[in-house]
Image (cartoon, rainbow, N blue to C red):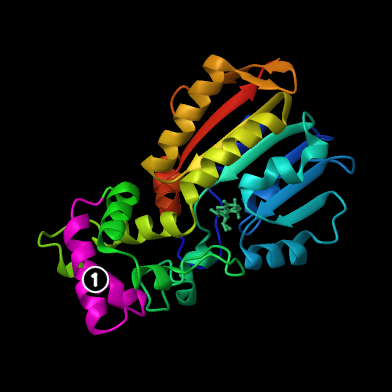
């Protein structure tokens, strides 16, 4: 079982097989992370190929510059993937493959100071981009109205106990600010009376993280942009890790396949390649626990 803080990319063989890389092709890695997928693509393109990468996390960008900064085929943008269309307008119609590997990298999860995980105690930050103006989870947890907390927990965590957790957060912070991930996790657990298979804090942390990073909105915007950028015969691949993300991808792909897209006067068509999402093999799941919930969906531009 893999447990280190190195990031182990998921569904590598499947991603490569669907991308069907052309040696001189142009590819977009919308979620660089620690560059596992980027390295695979770079090893398959020639000198005239290109890999454009994005990540909103400064640490990921630093990693990219260290690993591939000298490689003339590679560029990294420190930006949200909702901006791919705006920042890559010169590549419109010229990209052969765009892929998203959503969520967090292992280094983000494992660094207690990032506040994404309650396994270790740390400041409740949860911002993927710590240089952004957006507020941290600490600010929000300690100031949001009770009904806002309840709504976020039920909408983004599908959390049955959203109401009682929101109430407990508000009464706890009236006594003392909620500073750490351990404190927050303890408050959540105290509201749930049954013995659950997964730690009850999991869904609450997921919900707050999605809200703080506006993750679902990002995904919606980025899928539209990807459909605008992709060239004829090119594919868009999305690896998601929970049902809220997968639902968005499924519906957006169905919409594109049914309605196409009108792009600067010309009509584009798309075809769904994966009728059902592709999931990791049993071997991959047993070797990499993070891969267990991964789902890959693929669509192709046909006209
Ligand atoms: C699961 S990791 C990607 C791992 C990568 N495929 C690899 O093989 O190393 C997800 C990465 O996407 C980034 N990310 C998530 N949402 C993003 C967004 N809206 N815009 C840009 N980057 C995002 C995260 O910061 C994280 O580094």
Residue at screen point 71% across, 33% down: 229
For the record, the magenta segment spans 159-188
Establish if 260 lies above or below 120: above
**Image coordinates for residue 266, horizontal then vertical, percent:** 74, 16
Q: Quadrant of residue 55?
A: bottom right
Tell me the chief SS of the magenta region.
helix
Check if residue 163 falls in the magenta segment. Answer: yes
Identify the image quadrant of residue 98: top right
Q: Position of residue 210 (x, y in %)?
A: 43, 54
Residue at 57 percent of width and 69 percent of height: 130
Check disc 1 and report its element: helix, strand or loop: helix
Can residue 117 be seen from the camera position used here?
Answer: yes
Quarter of the rendering occupied by the N terminus: bottom left
Q: Quadrant of the C terminus?
A: top right
Neighbor class of circle 1 (other Cα within 10 Å; few <14, some 14-19, many 20+) is many
The residue lying toward the viewer, choosing from 225 and 265, is: 265
- Outermost residue to the left: 193
- Viewed as shown, does residue 171 lie left or right of 291? left
The residue carrying mark 1 is 170
Determine the residue located farthest toward the bottom in the rendered image: 176
Residue at 19% across, 69% down: 168
User: In the image, is 161 to the left or to the right of 180?
Assistant: left
Image position of 65 (left or right of 188): right
Q: Position of residue 239 (x, y in %)?
A: 51, 41
> In the figure, is residue 42 to the left or right of 228?
right
Q: How many marks?
A: 1
């Amino acid at each position: 079982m893999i447990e280190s803080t190195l990031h182990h990319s998921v569904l590598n063989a499947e991603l490569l097989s669907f991308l069907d890389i052309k040696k001189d092709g142009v590819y977009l890695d919308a979620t660089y992370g620690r560059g596992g997928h980027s390295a695979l693509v770079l090893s398959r393109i020639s000198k005239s190929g290109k890999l454009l990468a994005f990540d909103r996390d400064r640490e990921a960008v630093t990693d990219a510059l260290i690993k591939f900064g000298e490689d003339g085929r590679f560029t990294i943008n420190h930006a949200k993937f909702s901006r791919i269309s705006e920042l890559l307008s010169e590549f419109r119609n010229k990209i052969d493959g765009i892929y998203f590997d959503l969520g967090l990298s292992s280094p983000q999860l494992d660094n207690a100071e990032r506040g994404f995980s309650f396994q270790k105690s740390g400041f409740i930050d949860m911002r993927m981009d710590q240089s952004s103006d957006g507020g941290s989870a600490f600010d929000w947890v300690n100031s949001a109205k009770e009904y806002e907390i309840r709504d976020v927990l039920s909408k983004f965590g599908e959390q049955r106990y959203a109401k009682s957790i929101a109430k407990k957060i508000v009464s706890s912070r009236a006594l003392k600010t909620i500073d750490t991930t351990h404190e927050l996790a303890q408050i959540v657990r105290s509201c749930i009376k049954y013995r659950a298979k997964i730690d009850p804090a999991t869904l609450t942390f997921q919900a707050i993280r999605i809200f703080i990073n506006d993750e679902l909105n990002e995904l919606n915007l980025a899928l539209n942009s990807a459909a605008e950028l992709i060239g004829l015969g090119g594919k868009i691949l999305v690896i998601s890790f929970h049902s809220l993300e997968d639902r968005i991808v499924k519906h957006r792909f169905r919409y594109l396949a049914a309605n196409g897209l009108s792009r600067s006067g010309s009509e584009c068509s798309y075809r769904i390649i994966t009728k059902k999402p592709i999931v990791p093999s049993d071997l991959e799941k047993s070797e990499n626990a993070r891969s267990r919930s991964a789902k890959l969906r693929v669509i192709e531009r046909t006209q």
